[in-house]
Image (cartoon, helix red, strand yellow):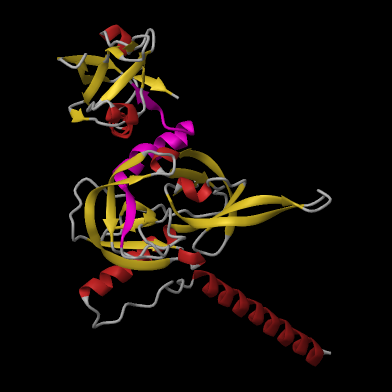
């Protein structure tokens, strides 16, 4: 009997020891340091190679894949399915789930999804967009997710020849890296809506369909632009890509997040289309009508006057705004895009082709 009791006690001790060992192993498994997500960078690489690898590792997880979906119903209209109709790139703007991409990436879509670097896909909604600058902001729910926003730099001090890195999803190939240099600065790029994006960055880093909305990075891994278009007869990269400068992005995105649109400033006037000024040999913007009660009206700006034959009797022509020469509606829009409603600006006007007048006009908010 004693032998049996001793045997049971030994079994219990062994069982308890097994439990303790298992608990210790489990504790060790929980507290063990996580394996590095990337292998160590080998010795012997060039400094430029190490820099490219480090930038990709630091910024790559902030780049996302954006899918634009259309809704399709079956023959009996009973079932609705999502059909991808386009895709592009984007990047994490903040820790609240906001994703920056191009407007043309989401244009015409009915539903949207964002795929993160870990491969998980999440439904997204459009927060706001600005077609004039080809920018849009999406939002995904952040519950259970850890967001690492991309570091944002500046574009006002960039230099031609500076190294740049593009990360995106060309042709659906996720998180693809290409490198190059800044080929030119101060380019102007027309949008499909007929507006012009100023100060566009030109780069020879390969940008292909699907790269749109992805970041252009400097050698510190900071976003200096949003890749938006390529110049290519074949539709593939020809070494001429364009990026929206990050200073423009940083000015517009907070407004899209807060208001869903850009609060645009205007002079309180309507103008004639550019071709009228060209056909009449006028250098500047012809004011067609002054809105009653606007700052322009209070400053004394006059509406266009025509005789019965349609010939100009009197006209105010805008020549410069805030010290910058304007010769088209696109140039006027770009100057005002940098201003806010309520701000006072200096406007140089040529009246009746002979008298130059400088006016101080308070800007108004326009739709």
Residue at x 21% of width, y 13% of height: 352
Question: Could you tell me which residue is drawn at 40 percent across and 37 percent down?
Answer: 254
Q: What stretch is highlighted in magenta?
A: 240-266
Q: Where is 108 relative to 284, above or below?
A: below
Rendered view: 282 above or below 8? above
- The verdict on residue 264 being magenta is yes
Q: Can residue 225 be seen in this view?
A: no
Most extreme residue toward the front is 309
The one nearer the camera, 17 or 154, is 154
Q: Residue 181: which quarter of the image?
A: bottom left
Query: Which residue is drawn at the image coordinates 75% and 88% (left, top)?
Result: 6
Residue 63: x, y in percent? 44, 58
Name the spot of residue 125 as percent of width and height, x first.
57, 44
Image mark count? 0
- Asked whether residue 283 is drawn in magenta, I would say no
Q: Nearer the viewer, residue 247 or 211?
A: 211
Q: Where is residue 11 in the image (x, y as percent from the top left)?
A: 73, 86
Q: In this view, does 96 lie above or below 348?
A: below
Which residue ends up furthest to the bottom in the rendered image? 3
Q: Which of 77 and 140 is in front in this view?
A: 77
Picture quarter with the C terminus: top left
* Residue 288 visible, this orientation: yes
Residue closest to the eye, 287 or 105: 287
């Amino acid at each position: 009997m004693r032998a049996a009791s001793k045997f049971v006690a030994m079994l219990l001790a062994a069982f308890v020891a097994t439990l303790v060992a298992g608990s210790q192993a489990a504790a060790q498994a929980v507290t063990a340091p996580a394996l590095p997500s990337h292998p160590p960078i080998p010795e012997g690489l060039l400094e430029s190679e190490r820099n490219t690898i480090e930038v990709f590792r630091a910024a790559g997880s902030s780049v996302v894949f954006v899918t634009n979906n259309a809704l399709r119903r079956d023959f009996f209209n009973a079932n609705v399915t999502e059909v991808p109709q386009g895709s592009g790139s984007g990047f994490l703007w903040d820790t609240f789930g906001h994703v920056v991409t191009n407007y043309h990436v989401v244009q015409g879509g009915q539903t949207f999804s964002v795929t993160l670097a870990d491969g998980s896909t999440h439904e997204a909604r459009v927060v706001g967009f600005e077609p004039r600058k080809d920018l849009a902001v999406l939002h995904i729910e952040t519950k259970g997710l850890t967001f690492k926003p991309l570091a944002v730099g500046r574009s006002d001090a960039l230099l031609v020849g500076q190294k740049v890195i593009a990360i995106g999803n060309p042709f659906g190939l996720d998180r693809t890296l290409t490198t190059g240099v800044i080929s030119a600065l101060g380019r102007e790029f027309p949008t499909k809506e007929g507006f012009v994006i100023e100060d566009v960055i030109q780069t020879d880093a390969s940008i292909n369909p699907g790269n749109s909305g992805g970041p252009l990075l400097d050698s510190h891994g900071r976003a200096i632009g949003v890749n938006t278009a390529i110049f290519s007869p074949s539709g593939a990269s020809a070494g001429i890509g364009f990026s929206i400068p990050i200073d423009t992005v940083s000015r517009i995105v907070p407004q899209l997040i807060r208001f869903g649109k850009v609060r645009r400033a205007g002079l309180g006037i309507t103008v004639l289309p550019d071709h009228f000024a060209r056909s009449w040999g006028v250098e500047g913007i012809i004011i067609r009508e002054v809105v009653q009660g606007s700052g322009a009206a209070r400053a004394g700006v006059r509406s266009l006057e025509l005789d019965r034959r349609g010939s100009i009797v009197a006209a105010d022509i805008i020549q410069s705004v805030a010290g910058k020469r304007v010769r088209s509606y696109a140039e006027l829009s770009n100057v005002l895009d940098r201003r806010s409603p309520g701000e006072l600006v200096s406007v140089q006007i040529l009246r009746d082709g002979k008298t130059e007048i400088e006016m101080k006009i308070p800007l108004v908010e326009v739709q």
